[in-house]
Every structure is written in structure tokens, then in C-alpha cells.
Amino acid sequence: MIDAIIIDDEMHCIERLQNLLKTHCAEKVRLLDACTDMDEGLQSIRRHNPGLLFLDVQLNGGTGFDLLQNIDLANIRVIFTTAFEQYAITAFRFSAIDYLLKPVGADELVQSVDKTIHHLAQATAARQYEALFFNLQAGVSAKRICLPTQQGMEFVDTADIVRCEASGNYTILYLSDAQKIIVSRTMKTFEELLERYGFFRLHHAHLVNLAYVRKYNKGKGGYVVMADGTEIEVATRRKEAFLKRVME
């Protein structure tokens, strides 16, 4: 059993989540409190010391991220609730942080709670929340992303990324200054994150910045030559879409 608090500025969302928890998670989650703004939420956290927060991204008096900066995250797991658009959902996935889309569904709630309880010993690093917050902002206002690495975080202009190469569950980013960054995220995640910035997936293992494509050579699928001299095969099934994109 894990103690939980809901923090959400929409009362109907709180009531829906309360009912779902009572109906589907009564033996797993003990709900201690429900709050509608950041200040009330902070007071409740300090009073109850919960193990789990259901936290809305946008709150009266601030954001969920503002709240997290004011508490000790060592023993608290967070499941964000959000009605954000698709790009924001990609940012959540990229940062490996749990989230539920509003309106919250029963199956998704149970799955997220089970996952959280199963990984209680694996505290989410503060840098993951920082990366998420940065990338959510970047999705609206800037062409810059935050990459969580083993050493910490790297802030990279998307215009400086020449290409991405898959390596198992990791992705290697090649930058215009010849730097390489290895990130523990799949190529699919990078494709979702970067496609809005002029990137195209040529092949299951290669995602390229079209601004750095210098030459295309014909063939069954053909291949491209990048600005750094790298030659990358174009998958046959992606050839038509690729040629259409570069001609736009």
C-alpha cells in the first residue's frame, strides 16, 4: 500500500481520479488528500509525507514543476496528469517520466500505479524532471532540447544535430562540431521529438537533419551523403517520402 496525494486545479478531474482509485486501486493506494493549488499541495506534502503524487502540470499559483523544486524527491514518486498536446507527450516519454492523459482512464491508471509500485526503489532523478520541463518549454518557444546523459544533462540546439544513429536501446547523436552524445533513449523517441525540426528517418537505424544532406545518389532506395561525409542508405519504403520532403 502506498500513500498518495492528488494535486490538480480542476475539481472534476480530482473527483474522477478519486473515484477511479477507490474502484480500481483501493488495495494498492491510500489517498490521503486532494489539493487544488500549489501552496495547498506543498502544505499537504509536508504534513502527510506521501509516497506518490498525482500531479497536474498546470496549477493555480504555478506549475507542477515549480512544486517539485520545493520538495525532497528522494522518497516520492510522481505521476503527472496532463491534457497537453502530442509534442508534450513525446517530451514525457523522452524524459522517462510517468504520465496520465486526461480524462484519465481506468486501465491506464492501474497500469501506471502498478509500474510505480514495482519501481519504488528506483527514484526518479531530479535531472529527468529538469529535462522534461526544459523540453516542454522548448516545444513551444525554442529549437533547443535537453538530453539526459550518464554525466548529467546536455543542452543542444537542434540545428547543430547532423544525424542520429540507433545502437540498441541507445541513440548516438552526431553534432556539427564533430561531438558525439550517447543517450539512453530509442530512435523512435528521437524521431517523435525531432521531426518537427526538419529531421527525417531514412532507415530504421538513421535519423537525419535534412539541412545537412548534401547529395542524394539514386538506386533501389539510394543513399545520401551528409555534410560530415557520412553515407547513409535510404530504405526503399522511405524513398518516396524522403524525396518529397527534400523537394518541399
Image: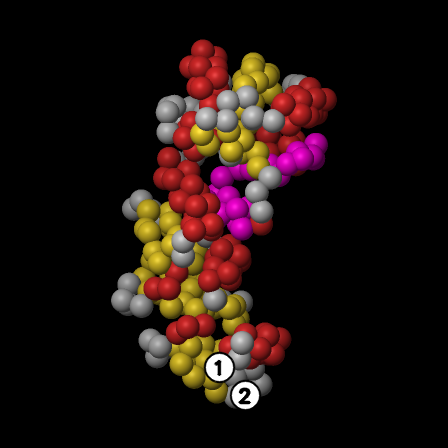
> Could you say whether the residue bearing mark 1 is in a helix, strand or loop?
strand
Does 97 appear in magenta?
Answer: yes
Do the numbered discs 2 and 1 sit on residues whose CB atoms are within 8 Å? yes
> Height in image: 239 above or below 15?
below
Question: Tag 1: residue type?
Answer: Tyr
Residues 126 and 166: in front is: 126
Quadrant placement of the N terminus:
top right
Q: Can residue 45 be seen in this snapshot?
A: no
Residue receiving disc 2? 219
Residue receiving disc 1? 223
Res. 239 image quadrant: bottom right
> Height in image: 154 above or below 53?
below
Real-space CA distance between mark 2 and mark 1, rounded to the nearest whole angstrom: 7 Å
Say which residue appears at 59% left-offset and 30% top-offset.
113
> Height in image: 211 above or below 20?
below
Mark 1 nearby-residue class (10 Å; few <14, some 14–19, many ≥20): some
Residue 36, image x and y in percent?
55, 21
> Height in image: 225 above or below 44?
below
Which residues fall within the magenta stretch?
87-107
Quadrant placement of the C terminus:
bottom right
Question: Tag 2: residue type?
Answer: Gly
